[in-house]
């Protein structure tokens, strides 16, 4: 990224810090506190009561930054609809948890229906308004396939899958914010290479917001982003992959998210079919925690892996 984009990222980070300083005390007063999962690691019990719904502050910083940088291109509205739509769905989930003092908000079915509905509306916009091509490209090759209407089914899988994968990654202090920041940096570069300056601007702003959020979310976290933040960030990454037609490349760039989601799928499948667990606990970051790694060590290692995945993704591109 050139200096202009770094300045945008830094100013967005500063905006996030300002919003966080004002908003975190408000979250405490509203009693928006984290309820730790009973089945989670015992060491996480001390996190109970930490303010959550930090994603609301992230979305506020995003909205302010979009206004300041005059991001008003019509073709980017669908991407912003996806981000803010998933944020609202996450807010509903977080709100139920906070009001009823439990670690479960919406049911899995309710959340999935909401995600599919929002993804479907986004795909409708891509098809009828933006007239996006339905070609799927294989990275580092000239191979491409026109999937026709099936492309939009794939797009919905990408959106729902990525949002849930980032949500699963958000289990340790600073883990999701740091790994998403790395992926956003990669998509800033890719969008610029395609002369999609509005997409690059949005990804740069989100990169800065993630970095600013780490000021409060790094261990020991003063606030968690909750589903409001993780679902929105995951949807944003998916939207950028679809917009830049790097759907398959997202698997590489978001390698950490893929590993986290796969660990859950493999764990559940193995336990239901064989009665045995593959990992000490899933998602994957808990496996390393229970293996004796400290939380900070796990987070830093996953950040490094995320950087490696992003570099490989850019090289493949």
Image (tube, rainbow, N blue to C red):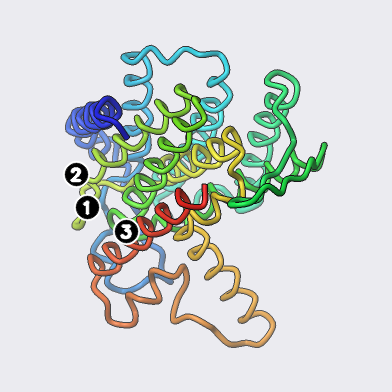
Q: CA distance from mark 3 to mark 2?
A: 16 Å
Judging by the rendered image, the residue that carries numbered circle 2 is 215
Secondary element type, mark 1: loop
Residue 117 placement (x, y as % from top left) = 68, 36
Using the image, determine if residue 83 lies above or below residue 166: above
Residue at horizontal 64 percent and vertical 51 percent from the top? 141
Which of the numbered marks, if any, corresponds to residue 59? none
Residue at horizontal 29 percent and vertical 35 percent from the top? 208
Using the image, determine if residue 244 lies above or below residue 112: above
Residue at horizontal 62 percent and vertical 81 percent from the top? 270
| Nearest to N terminus: mark 3 or mark 2 | 2
Secondary element type, mark 2: helix
Judging by the rendered image, the residue that carries numbered circle 3 is 303
Judging by the rendered image, the residue that carries numbered circle 1 is 218
Judge by depth and name the residue closer to the eye, 211 or 46.
Answer: 211
Residue 138 placement (x, y as % from top left) = 65, 50
Side of 167 where 125 appears, left or right: right
Instruction: Assess whether mark 1 and mark 2 are in contact (beta carbons under 8 angstroms).
Output: yes
Using the image, determine if residue 282 lies above or below residue 50: below
Residue 273 placement (x, y as % from top left) = 69, 83
Residue at horizontal 37 percent and vertical 34 percent from the top? 206
Side of 242 where 228 appears, left or right: left
Badge 3 density bin: few <14, some 14–19, many ≥20, Cα 10 Å: many
Q: CA distance from mark 1 to mark 3?
A: 12 Å
Using the image, determine if residue 300 lies above or below residue 235: below
Badge 1 density bin: few <14, some 14–19, many ≥20, Cα 10 Å: many
Judge by depth and name the residue closer to the eye, 180 or 191.
Answer: 191
Badge 2 density bin: few <14, some 14–19, many ≥20, Cα 10 Å: some
| Nearest to N terminus: mark 1 or mark 3 | 1
């Amino acid at each position: 990224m050139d200096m202009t984009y770094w300045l945008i990222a830094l100013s967005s980070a500063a905006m996030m810090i300002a919003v966080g300083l004002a908003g975190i005390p408000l979250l405490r007063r509203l009693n928006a506190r984290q309820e730790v999962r009973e089945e989670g690691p015992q060491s996480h019990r001390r996190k109970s009561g930490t303010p959550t719904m930090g994603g609301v502050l992230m979305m506020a910083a995003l909205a302010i930054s979009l206004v300041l940088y005059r991001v008003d291109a019509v073709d980017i509205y669908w991407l912003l609809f996806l981000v803010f739509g998933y944020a609202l769905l996450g807010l509903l989930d977080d709100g139920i948890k906070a009001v009823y003092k439990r670690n479960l908000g919406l049911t899995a079915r309710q959340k999935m229906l909401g995600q599919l509905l929002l993804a479907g509306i986004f795909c409708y916009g891509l098809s009828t308004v933006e007239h996006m091509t339905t070609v799927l490209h294989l990275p580092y090759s000239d191979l491409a396939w026109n999937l026709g209407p099936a492309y939009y089914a794939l797009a919905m899988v990408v959106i729902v899958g990525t949002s849930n994968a980032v949500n699963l990654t958000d289990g340790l202090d600073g883990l999701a914010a740091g790994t998403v920041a790395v992926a956003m940096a990669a998509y800033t570069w890719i969008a610029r290479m395609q002369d999609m300056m509005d997409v690059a601007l949005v990804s740069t702003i989100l990169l800065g917001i993630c970095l600013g959020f780490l000021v409060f979310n790094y261990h020991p976290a003063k606030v968690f982003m909750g589903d409001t933040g993780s679902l929105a960030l995951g949807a944003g990454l998916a939207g950028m992959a679809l917009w830049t037609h790097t759907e398959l490349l997202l698997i590489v760039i978001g390698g950490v998210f893929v590993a986290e989601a796969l660990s859950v799928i493999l764990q559940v499948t193995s336990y239901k079919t064989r009665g045995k667990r593959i990992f000490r606990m899933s998602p994957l970051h808990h496996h390393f925690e229970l293996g004796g790694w400290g939380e900070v060590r796990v987070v830093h290692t996953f950040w490094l892996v995320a950087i490696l995945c992003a570099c490989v993704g850019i090289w493949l591109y």
